[in-house]
Image: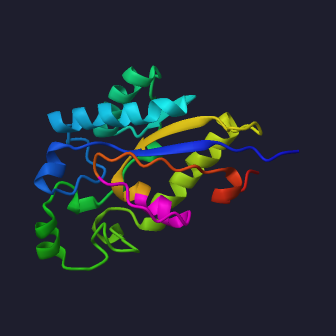
């Protein structure tokens, strides 16, 4: 019997007011898309059309839902919200400027650019916890949408920069999902090595 596979298209939410200010957004629900971010989301949607996706998922945070809503209106899919796709919680660093975080806390692991970021001591999450919930989500996606047919069905996932980068690195892809840039990757259950019980 062939192993189930699915084509996953990862897209980072597009520009927000906090991105423009270089603030840590983390799990805060305050940032909203800028007009530029809305335009970027339309561009992302057009780049996805050729894949003819079967489903569209997004984080429950407003910036992800706004991006997915714009994408969904163009690719004609309603976004399905899943809390496991949330950005890494940065605790007390949420909403602060990057320079403020460095000045107040001064620890290298309290940076989303650190390869083993860990915000637990200030009320946030560590990299391993963020990856764990995203992998749990991917297992469910393969169960729900996976098929043995070729080409496999495509599923769009609108998430967040830090968490999707950590997941991509964990899966051995290692590419950065730049702001406003759609970089599709093809994953199968075998490629991402996620066991299905």
- Which sits in the foreground, 92 or 188? 188
Kindly identify the residue that appears in the image at 44 percent across and 28 percent down. Answer: 79
**Magenta span:** 165-178
- Which sits in the foreground, 86 or 9? 9
- Which sits in the foreground, 126 or 112? 112
Estimate the x, y position of residue 134 in percent, counting from the top left.
Answer: 51, 52
User: Is 57 displayed left or right of 112 in the figure?
Assistant: right
User: Is 47 displayed left or right of 155 in the figure?
Assistant: left
Residue 66 within the magenta-colored segment of the rendering: no
| Colour style of the rendered protein structure | rainbow
Residue placed farthest to the bottom in the image?
107
Which image quadrant is residue 130 in?
bottom left
Estimate the x, y position of residue 1 in percent, counting from the top left.
Answer: 88, 45
Kindly identify the residue that appears in the image at 41 percent across and 60 percent down. Answer: 165
Kindly identify the residue that appears in the image at 32 percent across and 54 percent down. Answer: 178
The vertical placement of 186 against 80, above or below, is: below
Estimate the x, y position of residue 59 in percent, counting from the top left.
Answer: 40, 40
Estimate the x, y position of residue 159 in percent, counting from the top left.
Answer: 40, 45
């Amino acid at each position: 019997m062939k192993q189930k596979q699915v084509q996953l298209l990862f897209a980072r939410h597009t520009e927000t007011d906090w991105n423009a200010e270089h603030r840590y957004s983390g799990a805060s629900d305050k940032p909203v898309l800028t007009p530029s971010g809305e335009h970027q989301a339309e561009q992302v949607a057009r780049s996805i059309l050729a894949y003819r996706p079967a489903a569209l998922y997004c984080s429950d945070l407003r910036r992800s839902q706004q991006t997915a809503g714009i994408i969904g209106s163009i690719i004609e899919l309603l976004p399905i919200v899943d809390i496991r796709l949330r950005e890494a919680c940065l605790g007390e660093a949420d909403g602060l400027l990057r320079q403020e975080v460095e000045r107040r806390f001064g620890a290298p692991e309290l940076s989303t650019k650190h390869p083993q970021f860990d915000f637990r001591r200030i009320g946030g999450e560590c990299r391993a916890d963020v990856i764990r919930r995203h992998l749990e989500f991917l297992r469910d996606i393969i169960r729900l949408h996976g098929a043995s047919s070729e080409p496999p069905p495509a599923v769009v996932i609108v998430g967040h920069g830090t968490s999707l980068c950590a997941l991509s690195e964990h899966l051995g892809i290692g590419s950065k999902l730049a702001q406003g840039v759609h970089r599709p990757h093809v994953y199968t259950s075998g490629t991402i090595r996620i066991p299905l019980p």
